[in-house]
Image (cartoon, helix red, strand yellow):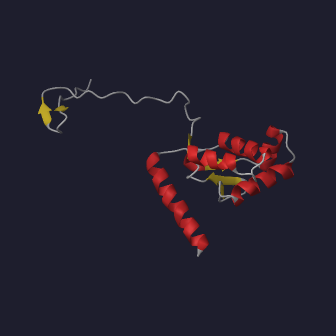
Amino acid sequence: MKRTQLVGYLDDQGELHEGVPVLCNKKVQSPYGSAWMQINQDFLRELAARKDVTGEVLRVFLYLNSRLDFENIIRVPQVEIAKALGLQPQNVHRAIKKLVEIGVLIPGPIASSWRLNPHAGWKGKVTHLRQAHRDQTDRILKSVK
């Protein structure tokens, strides 16, 4: 059995004191496992206030968020969304088109894939969120030029 060596502890001033064990708390695991996301409440308020966002668009938005993967990737065929929500495929297509048009969704690299705008919500490491914000802002600035 491998023996561990006692190193010390750091006090609140950042000084190392030898001979006293370092105590670390265990990382707290989410009770939701991987089924969680962060959402921007200001974004939700703005989305709810839009008169051009109908019930079908909101239902599709909610379903897509339920399928959100890390780094805000959403991969789900539109026919699956239509079946799950009891909607016509053309209505799902129209709802997704609206979400892209208003900037909630960003088209993904392959068919039937999107990214949730990181300014709306996020699923992933917060350090990656900051870079996603910068990337999205750059995309917006390039499209304005």
Vertical side of 142 occupied by 36: above or below: above
Q: Name the residue furthest bottom.
A: 145
For this rendering, which residue is in front, 28 or 38? 38
Q: How far from the left and from the top, in percent, is residue 92?
A: 80, 49
Q: Quick check: 89 left or right of 31? A: right
Q: Name the residue furthest left.
A: 18
Count how many numbered circles sit on residues in the image. Answer: 0
Q: Residue at x 14, y 38 (%)?
A: 15
Vertical side of 132 occupied by 14: above or below: above
Q: How far from the left and from the top, in percent, is residue 137?
A: 53, 63
Q: Name the residue furthest top.
A: 1
Vertical side of 116 occupied by 63: above or below: above
Q: How far from the left and from the top, in percent, is residue 123?
A: 55, 44
Q: Quick check: 88 left or right of 112? A: right
Q: Residue at x 56, y 35 (%)?
A: 34
Quarter of the image with the C terminus is bottom right
Q: Residue at x 62, y 45 (%)?
A: 44
Q: Residue at x 17, y 28 (%)?
A: 6
For this rendering, which residue is in front, 63 or 101? 101
Q: Is residue 40 visible?
A: no
Q: Quick check: 94 left or right of 29? A: right
Q: How far from the left and from the top, in percent, is residue 8?
A: 16, 31
Dividing the picture into quarters, in which one does residue 109 lie?
Answer: bottom right
Vertical side of 125 occupied by 105: above or below: below
Q: Is residue 41 visible?
A: yes
